[in-house]
């Protein structure tokens, strides 16, 4: 049994595609964390009869639940209680698109002029959760934030649309568009009742569709299946 977890760039470098394609020849099944990723793998990596099964990531919805702001982050940053915090948690690498987020923040500051803690401390202080990724599978950070009862504002890439669901598609923004991202932040900050309703919808979505238990059951079922016959030596 070999099971690897890693982020996948889009598009894949050719060397990744070649090596993974060779590995698939002796693989019983490939698991993808989203439908979009499954289609990407089918088109560029997985060849022959190797099946692809979609198993979305899941999170512990009890551990990641709505919590009151304990003030830790605000004290460290010297922020008043009424100041909204737009938060994002993720790996510091180019695929996460943080340059778009920084540009969007500059746009947001202009609009207002015109008119490292523990993850739970961070999430409890955020007014909303945001991501500006260029590519995603099924983001665990997004699932954790939604499970914690945060309204998401994220780029419409990879599995993000499947994670937020139909009731929250209005919180998706096009990728590589800092102006649209800043506008979506502004809308969420200025409309507290709708942001609160969307936060409740976000938590319910993760509880219903992306629990840790559901993910574990899916992998147990996958691992307990009969392996396919080994490919003959080339």
Image (tube, rainbow, N blue to C red):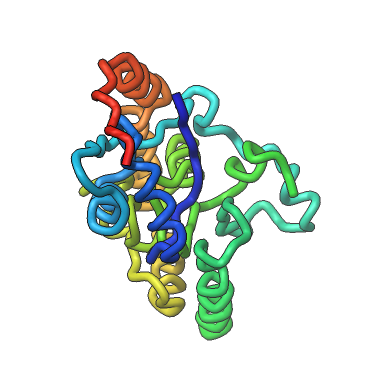
Tell me if I can see residue 189 in this picture. no
Q: Residue at x 31, y 53 (%)?
A: 45
Give the quadrant of residue 57.
top left
Quadrant where the C terminus sits is top left
Q: Residue at x 73, y 44 (%)?
A: 117
Give the quadrant of residue 199.
top left
164 and 195: which is toward the camera = 164
- Residue 27 in the image: above or below residue 188: above
Q: Residue at x 43, y 79 (%)?
A: 179
15 and 82: which is toward the camera = 15
Q: Residue at x 31, y 47 (%)?
A: 164
The location of residue 116, given as percent across then percent down, is 74, 49
Q: Is residue 222 left or right of residue 103?
A: left
- Residue 67 in the image: above or below residue 112: above
- Residue 142 in the image: above or below residue 133: above
The location of residue 40, given as percent across then percent down, is 28, 56
In this view, which residue lies farthest toward the front? 234
The location of residue 78, given as percent across then percent down, is 79, 57
22 and 51: which is toward the camera = 22
Give the quadrant of residue 177.
bottom left
The location of residue 39, given as percent across then percent down, is 23, 52
Q: How many marks?
A: 0
Quadrant where the N terminus sits is top left
Tell me if I can see residue 106 in this picture. yes
């Amino acid at each position: 049994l070999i099971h690897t977890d890693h982020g996948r760039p889009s598009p894949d470098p050719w060397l990744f595609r070649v090596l993974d394609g060779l590995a698939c020849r002796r693989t019983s099944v490939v698991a993808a964390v989203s439908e979009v990723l499954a289609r990407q793998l089918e088109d560029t990596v997985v060849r022959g009869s190797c099946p692809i099964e979609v198993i979305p990531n899941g999170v512990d919805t009890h551990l990641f639940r709505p919590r009151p702001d304990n003030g830790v982050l605000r004290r460290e940053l010297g922020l008043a209680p009424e100041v909204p915090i737009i938060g994002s948690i993720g790996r510091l690498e180019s695929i996460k698109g943080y340059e778009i987020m920084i540009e969007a923040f500059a746009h947001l500051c202009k609009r207002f002029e015109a008119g490292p803690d523990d993850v739970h401390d961070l999430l409890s202080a955020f007014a909303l959760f945001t991501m500006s990724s260029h590519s995603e599978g099924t983001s665990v950070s997004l699932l954790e934030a939604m499970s914690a009862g945060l309204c998401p504002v994220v780029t419409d890439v990879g599995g993000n649309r499947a994670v937020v669901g139909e009731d929250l598609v209005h919180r998706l923004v096009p990728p590589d568009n800092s102006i649209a991202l800043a506008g979506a932040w502004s809308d969420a900050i200025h409309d507290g009742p709708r942001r609160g309703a969307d936060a409740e919808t976000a938590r319910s979505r993760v509880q219903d569709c992306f629990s840790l238990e559901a993910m574990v059951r899916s992998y147990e079922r996958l691992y307990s299946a009969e392996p396919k016959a080994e490919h003959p030596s080339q």
